[in-house]
Structure formats: C-alpha cells, structure tokens
Amino acid sequence: MTNKIIYAVLFLMAPTFLFAQNEAGVKHLEEVKKKLAVSAADTNRVLLIIDLCTAYQWTDIDSLEYYSKKGIELAQRLNFVRGEVRILNNQGIAFLFRGDIPKALNILYQALRLAEKNGYRLETAISLNNIGSCYFSLNDHNRSLEFLRNAVAINKTVQHSPKDVYWKIYIDFWLGTEYIYVNKFDSAELYLNRAYTEAFDPGFTDLYSLRPTIFMFYGYLYLKEKKFDSAYHYLTQAISIYGAYKDVFGGADAYTYMAMVFKEQNKPDSVIYYAKKGLDLSLNQNNNYKSSTLNNSRLLAEQYEHSNPALALKYLKIQLETNDSLYGARKIQDLQKTLAEVQQQEQESREKQIEKQNKQKQNVFLVGLGVLLVIAFILYRNNLQRKKANVLLQYQKEKVETTLSDLKATQAQLIQSEKMASLGELTAGIAHEIRNPLNFVNNFSEVSNELIDEMKIELDQGDNDKAKIIADDVKQNLEKILQHGKRADAIVKGMLQHSGTSTGAKEPADINKLADEYLRLAYHGLKAKDKSFNAMFETEFDHNVAQINIIPQDIGRVILNLINNAFYAVNEKAKAAQPPKAGVQYKPMVTVCTKKLKDKIEVRVKDNGNGIPVSIKEKIFQPFFTTKPTGQGTGLGLSLAYDIVKAHGGELKVETKEGEGSGFTILLPII
C-alpha cells in the first residue's frame, strides 16, 4: 500500500466533522447564525464563531476564512486566548485537509505557542495532536508519534468538561491509529478498544461522528493483519453510517479501505467497484477531497493497467494531476521553508535560554570575583607579614590567570560563532544555486518514469516503432538529467572549495571569480533569511587581474564579511528612508570592484548606505566593537578580516562619508 494513503484519514481532525452537510447540521448552522446576529461582542460570541468555523472547515473554506478572521479579531480584543487557539486549530486542520501542509504547520505552531504560553493544557494537547497529524500526513511517523504521545500525556492531566469529552476520547484514539501505520497492532487495538468503549457510551449521544470512524479503523487494522472477513464486517458498518449521515468524506475513505481489502484478495472487479464509489464521492464534493481522489484514482489505474489501457490512462491522469496539486515542487519548497522556520524558531528559543543561563553564570562569576577582590584587599591591608602577603598575591595571580583563560576560551567561541554565521549564509546561497538543476533532475526523472511505463505498454502491444520513439525521448531526458546533475556537482564542488576548513596553504586563485561567487552567495543568503530584503548590486572586474597566491577560504571570508556589511548598511538605510521628495527615491546599491595595480591587486566593496560616523571610524577594526543591535553581530568580523589580510601581507582600508556610504579596500601583494 502506498504511503500517501495516509491522507485518507485527515478528515478526522475536528469534533463535528461534516455535521453541516446533513439536514440536522444545516438546521444547526442556521440556529448558530441567528444567535450570532443578536449576540453581544463577548466571549460567548467567540464560542458561536468557533462552532461555525468547526463546521465550515470541512465544507466552505471561504466562510471559514471570513469567520476565522472575525473570531480572532474579537478574541484578541477580549484577550480570550483560549478562543483564539481553538480558531487557529480550525484553520490549521482545514488547510491540512486540503493538502496545504506548510500553511497548516505555520498556523498550528502559532496555536501551540499561544496555548503553552498561557498554560492551557487541553488546547496544548489539541495543538500537539494536530501538529502530529501534519507529520503523520508527511509519513514522518517518528515525529508524529513524538507529538501524539506528548498530546496524550498532557490530555491525561486535563479535567474534561462534558463539552470537551470528545477530545478526551479522540486524542487517545488518534494515537491508536498511528500505531496501525507503524505496525504496532497490539497497541493500536488497545487504544481503539478504549475509544470504542467510551464513544459508544449511551450517555454520549453527540459522539456519533467518532463511531463510524472507529469502525473504519478497526477495518483497516484487520486489513493490515490479513483478517479480511473482520475488515469487511467493520468497513460495511462504517459505509452504512457514513451514508446515513451523508458524510461524503468519511464515505470516500471507507470505500478506499474496502477496495484495498479486495485488492489484497486479488479480486479486481470488487476493487474497481468500491474505488469508483469512493472516487465519485470525492470528485462530486464541492471542496474536492483531493487525498481520496488520489488514492482511488491510483487503485483504478493499477486495476485497469493490463485489462483496459485507455481507462488506466484516464485514471492515471487524474492521479498525476491530483498528486501534483498535493505534492508539487512549489508545495515541497513551501514545506521546506516552513520546517526551516520552525527549526529556526526552536533554535532561537534554545539560544535565548542558553544566553540567559550564560548571563546568570556571568553575573555569579562577577559577584564572586568582586567578593574575592574585596577579601584580597582586606587581607592585604590587614596583614603586613611578608609571607601572608606573598600567599595572597599568589592566590590573586592564579585567579587572574583562570579569568584570562576563561576569556580566551570565550573569545575562541565567539570567533567560531562568527565563522558559523558566515557558513550559514553561504549555505543559504548554495541552496539557491543548486535548486534549479535539482528541479530539472527531478522533473526529467518523473517524466522518464512515465515514458518507461508507456514504452512497456507499446512493447506489450507489439508496436516496436512507437517504443523506439519513446526510448529516444527517455535517452534525451537522461542526457538532460546528466547535464543538470553535473551542473549541480560543479556548483557544490566550487562552493566546497571556497567554504571548507582552511589548511593554511596558499594556492593560485582567481580573485574575480572568488568575489563574484561570494557576492551572489551573500545576496541569496540574505534574501533567503529576510524576504523583505531588497538591494541592487553590480560588479566592475578588471579582467587583467591574474591568479594570485592566497588562502581562498580565508580571503573568501573577508570578502563575504565586507559584502554582508555593505548589504546590511544599505538595507538599514532603506528601512529608515523617508518618502521620496521631488521624485528622488533612495536605491540601495552595493558595488564590488577589482583592479590590477603595479605590484598589488585591489578588491573594493562600496555601498551607498549611511556611512560610518567619524567618531567611531578608528574603532571599527577593534575586536568586539560593533554598531549592530545586540544579537546581530559579535564585533569580530572586521577584526578577523583585518588580521587575515595582514597575514597575507596586505592592507585593509576604509573610506567613508557620513550619510553617503562607505568603501572598504583590500590590497593584496602579487607574489
């Protein structure tokens, strides 16, 4: 069974499911809207909006967006954080259900942070559960289990009200379904049995939506265990109940699982029958249940592959179009960006915690050092005996040496941090450079797979001429894959050559190429880190510049640091710029120039930023001196750059005019 079949269960993420689709549900929505029309702007109004959002998240994304916006605005005005978290979960699940996992994760992590910050345990458990569902849909079961287990652990500490009894059952139940996918059937059955017992309690008549779902997953569990009769029994009940409630989403999924039961038993006619039932439901739904469409069209394409190629092609086309809308390159890029942002937020949180701990340690150290100095002074003043004075001086000497050693270690750590910051910016730039050839490789590989399938069909039909034409197309694609693969390999090799650990050995290097590479990497790295960043750059390279003996990694770091500083300067000026006067608008510009002098090579980085004030110009090459806000610079970049250039026998100079910009010049000897 394909991994993407897991999308078939995403409709399980909310308490009311598709209640709004049947007659009772429509009546309920009308009653809620009437109450909303006359309600005051208080928390009860927010709760009514939550009720609407819960229903609309399955049936009408536009209505969901409208009421979500209204509800969040009101909840924020009332400081009703619990209501805001519930609405965010509605939004997150709606986007998850429609295949927009990056947007779903962004919203759900926002809900989780709000719930944790305010100590709302049930909302924290709900948010964790829904984030786990996102990773579940990505087939990352280890990450999914991590979030789901945390959700269950927190949920056990909650005193559930009658209105929240659904979540008491559901969070445990969802962990049970995850255990099916990781083949822990005993654990899965334990949680399903627990959910069954509570959901079918006569006192909880409003839990009807869980009941067919539990039947369906009993069916899937027994399918995985090859107990086909039991699987058929439970899936039949699920289909019947979903049909009674006119739940097209649940019905589509139940038909999919039933088709899989017959596929395992090699009964193609039954597979086709139930897969068509599921596909009809998913395609006839206004919201277009894409995951079910994908699963059922895949099953039909597989069954018709040998018996009816025309129908197989029809369903394959549906499958590919749906797959692209769910897992296309743009979605993958958005997901990578979202996961990177989440990791960055987690890393920043850890760094802030470490920084806080370090400050506490530093304060304790300073207090301790102050106490020691006071004691030493008192002992020195009150003890005139030479022996005791010598002991005291020796003691002070050892303490100073320890402090000096600690300071040296701290300095080494800061230098390493500066290097790692540069490496991070290089990595972002490299990622941008290799993304295009990799996209070509992926696209041509996917097309080649489809062509090979077509060639097999033509060979089976005995049409060798068409098969040869297809083979020629495959060969052309493979040549393009090789071409773009070599391109990506060349990019990676070039970047590794200029970003690796320095060996200290000089080697001939093209300074023009080096400057051009680091200019592009710096720009793309900053662009990846800050989407609002916008600046122009240009190069003025002297093509008479020959290769010179340098340590490329070290000089590369110098150039990268100067370019980053230039981009930072123009970006800061652009942010602070007033509206243009008399048609004059500020245009941020960075220029990188090279020039061959008599016995030297000149590399110059210019910007039209705010320039450097005269009062601090003499300090900019001092270690730890920086004008950037706390946390955005260590004050070691220019100091390290100055030392590297000096070690090469060169000079690093600065020319600046306050309000107009700066220019840093590297002079390297031609050896």
Image (cartoon, grey):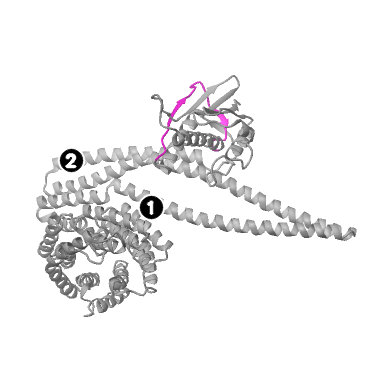
Under mark 1, the amino acid is Leu
Comparing labels 1 and 2, the label whose residue is closer to the camera: 1
Q: Which residues are magenta?
A: 532-553
**Observer able to see residue 226:** no
User: Badge 1: few (under 14), some or many (20 or more) residues near its Cα, within 10 Å?
Assistant: some
Res 339 label: 1
329 or 624, which lies in front?
A: 624
**What kind of element bears circle 1?**
helix
Pointer 1 and pointer 2: residues touching (CB < 8 Å)? Answer: no
Q: Which mark is residue 468?
A: 2
* Residue 62, visible in the rendered structure: yes
The x, y position of residue 215, in whole percent, is 20, 72
Q: Secondary structure at mark 2?
A: helix
Give the position of the N terminus as an image quadrant.
Answer: bottom left
The amino acid type, in three-letter code, at marker 2 is: Lys
In this view, which residue lies farthest toward the right?
385
Residue 438 pos. (x, y %): 34, 42
